[in-house]
Image (cartoon, rainbow, N blue to C red):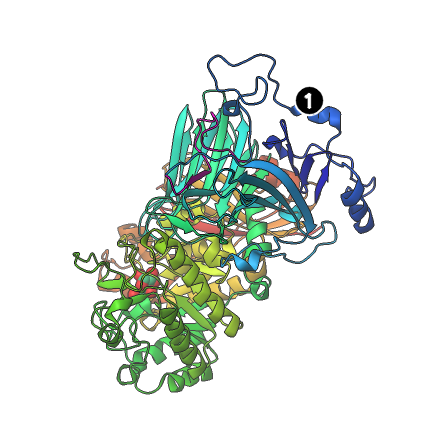
Amino acid sequence: MITVKDHIYTMTTRDTSYVLSTPDGKNIENLHYGKRINRAPLTADTGKIAGAERAELTDTADIMTDGKTVQALKEKYNNPYGNAIQSTGNMTLDNICLEFSNAGTGDYRILPLILRREDGCISTRFYFADSVLYEGLYKDRDRTGMPYAREGEPSSDTGRPYTLEMIYRNKAEGESGDDKALELRLIYTAFEDCDVITRRTVLINDTSVTYVIEDIASMMLDLHGTDYVLKTFDGMWTRERHAHDKVLESGIYETGSVHGISSNVHNPFIMLSDIDATEDHGDCYAFNLIYSGNHRERVEVSEYGKVRILTGINPQGFEYRLKPGETFYTPEAVMTYSDKGFNGASQNMHRFVTGHIIPDNFRRSLRPVLINNWEATYFDFNRRKLLNLAKDAARLGIELFVLDDGWFGIRNDDTTSLGDWSVNEKKLGGSLKSLVDEIKALGLKFGIWVEPEMISKKSKLYEAHPDWAVSVPGMEDYLGRNQYNLDYTLPEVRDYIVGILSKLLKSADISYVKWDMNRPFTDLYSKGGTYPGEFAHRYVLGLYDVMKRLTDAFPHVLFEGCSAGGSRFDLGILSFMPQIWTSDDTDANERMMIQGGTSYGYPPSTMGAHVSASPNHQTLRETTLETRFDVASMGVLGYELDLTRLSHMERKIISEQVKFYKAHRELLQTGVFTRVYDRHDRVIWQIADDEGDHAVALLYRRSSEPNKSDDILFAKGLKEDALYKVRVKESKIPVKTFGNLINMVSPVHIKEEGVMQAMIGKAYAMDGEVEEYTVSGAALMYAGIRLNSRFIGTGLGEGTRVMGDHSARLYTIDKIG
Ligand code: GLA
């Protein structure tokens, strides 16, 4: 809901208010963004706004604030500020919470726009002129060439999104003599249901000269106060999105990407919280960008005691020539606020991603359990191997078979064939269709890997179109994984990719595509004439064009984004592809950090999570099959190991896991994710339904601390007065866990790591502890269940929990009364 009255602009979501006003008729002041401060429109009985009432309020009433409240919220300027530059009266633009700020007006903080005039001047005088308010999304959204937040399904207690356009004009006086102007529009859309407000900036050049945009933010937000912590999500290949905190002091903080993709180094999602906010309490703001390219997030703590946040395209290498009559649209930025700490802000973002980002037709669809052959075979496969893998997968209850890299051209390693998307029938032992049909006959769906944004030097495509590879003629090339980026700024390249992939998708019954992108950009250069300063942005626009055309043409295909694991995990990709391969690191312990960090901004249904071999191929760490599953079940489950080499016991365990996952899939993929506890090497996560009737909790132990207090299982968000049955998921403990201790109970000596131990381990495993409790919601949330004692070297009593380093358990929590 948004209302406009007497130059007070109020955006209201379920629990937040954002109030703007104009102090001087030229600038817009942010009077408040945070916890909801209006109460007026709530109906007495439900606290919700009914439809008719809503329409009436929109037209006539100032539902948010009256003039007196606004007067109370306004910044006061009773006397001048030392040597500060003055605007109207004593007002200094350096010390006011603004929505937009011009270069050259005495606001010395980081600026949202650097626009260079023909003569090199960068000063601007954009003054607020007008506003437009309407129901629904931004009216020119389809002209932006970028994905945008979807309208989603209207819910009974919140209405459609509303959009507010704040229009600023910069008259080109003295330049052309006519009445033409540059126009800047700040676009706000309020999504009530998830407490999200999105923002973007639109710049329209209605003058007769070209301007150069050197830097343009999607959004600028000024807040009062300085005591904030900035949380960023950073990493590298196989170590993506680890959460890092920076306690802010005076100065400027910057994060972002110049990789040409959103990158694994710094995710565009950031959080800004009160210094003492916790997972459940305290003010917490969160920001993201619906964009997959170079991005930058900056936060300045000013000397006047305010904080400014800017997010948008990264200006490094960016120089956009805005010609007469042209419009520039920034990517849409996303912001939310919660007074319920990090979990509160995360849950808002999760609801937003599910309700307004992922494609409508996948919003409610449950994702299949898949087997991917990559870590099972790498490039070394043939038809027999694939079919054997598929047969075992089908027996275990797995639903989708994914054929990864190596099925096309002559690709038996990563040096060739990208771009040649024709089936290697010799390697596949026949046509793709014949393979797909055989796999489908086993009861599995079929999916395929592609990397359509790349070209190998050793490829037919490169021979035919060397100019399609991104590089600078006459300069040394820097390759990643032996490959070049394809120049998606060129329409002919995009048409070729759409054509060849459409042919592939029509050639067999393919219901899933893993869309990979394995190298970041180095040179930002097109041999086809794209202006270098616009290359990085135009590449992203080209990518969205290709993704849109393909996903529109094949709406039933589930696309999973991938970029050397999770190097492009962002809202732009999720707008086309409902899930993303979270990381090439499948080690359970590392995944706790990776999935945990990712969970701050993205829900579990977006995170591909696979059970792989042990020792793990990335870390060589050993973890139990149970632990690997428990952690993977907190995302979209898959398997990525050679199922044909499993022991009898491992098969039994996996088929039980798949059964458990399917039985709880709806909850795990659509429920509310909460980080319950993370201290003393112990982590608890929980996924519950909206009502708080059912939940699955994960308990993870980073290390086995001998003889320390036992684990306590807590939950959150349940019903205090309800009664719950809490059960540990059945699990198996491999014999080798006990090393040579097994000889304390074995009648014959079993050599550690010996043949006998291996043989026993294949057929036998010990049952894990059985624990079951009946407990009230209040007791479970506020006291916690003191779980059975852990194994501490003094023997194995009945119910002892055997949990070594890097081990996990799942618990089901079900309301029984
Ligand atoms: C990337 C992906 C992997 C796998 C390989 C294939 O690294 O992240 O999952 O698909 O490419 O080459």
Magenta-drawn segment: 100-119
Q: Nearer the viewer, residue 363 or 65?
A: 65
Q: Under tag 1, what secondary structure? A: helix
Measuring 40% from the left and 79% from the top, which residue is drawn there? 504
Vertical position of residue 486 compared to residue 130: above or below: below
Measuring 30% from the left and 72% from the top, which residue is drawn there? 419
Vertical position of residue 423 compared to residue 419: above or below: below
Vertical position of residue 579 compared to residue 9: above or below: below
Instruction: Please tell me whether the stretch drawn in magenta is mainly helix, strand or loop.
Output: loop
> Crowding near pointer 1: few (<14 within 10 Å), some, many (20+)?
few
Q: Nearer the viewer, residue 532 or 477?
A: 532
Q: Nearer the viewer, residue 729 or 175?
A: 175
Classify residue 417 by image quadrant: bottom left
Question: Is residue 458 visible from the viewing direction of this image?
Answer: yes
State the quadrant of the N terminus. Answer: top right
Q: Report which residue position mark 1 lands on.
A: 72
Residue 326 drawn at (x, y percent)? 49, 54
Q: Nearer the viewer, residue 312 or 414?
A: 312
Q: Is residue 490 left or right of residue 782?
A: left
Q: Determine the quadrant in which ligand 1 lies.
A: bottom left
Classify residue 702 by image quadrant: top left
Q: Is residue 232 left or right of residue 473?
A: right
Q: Is ligand 1 within 8 Å of the beta carbon of the residue shown at mark 1? A: no
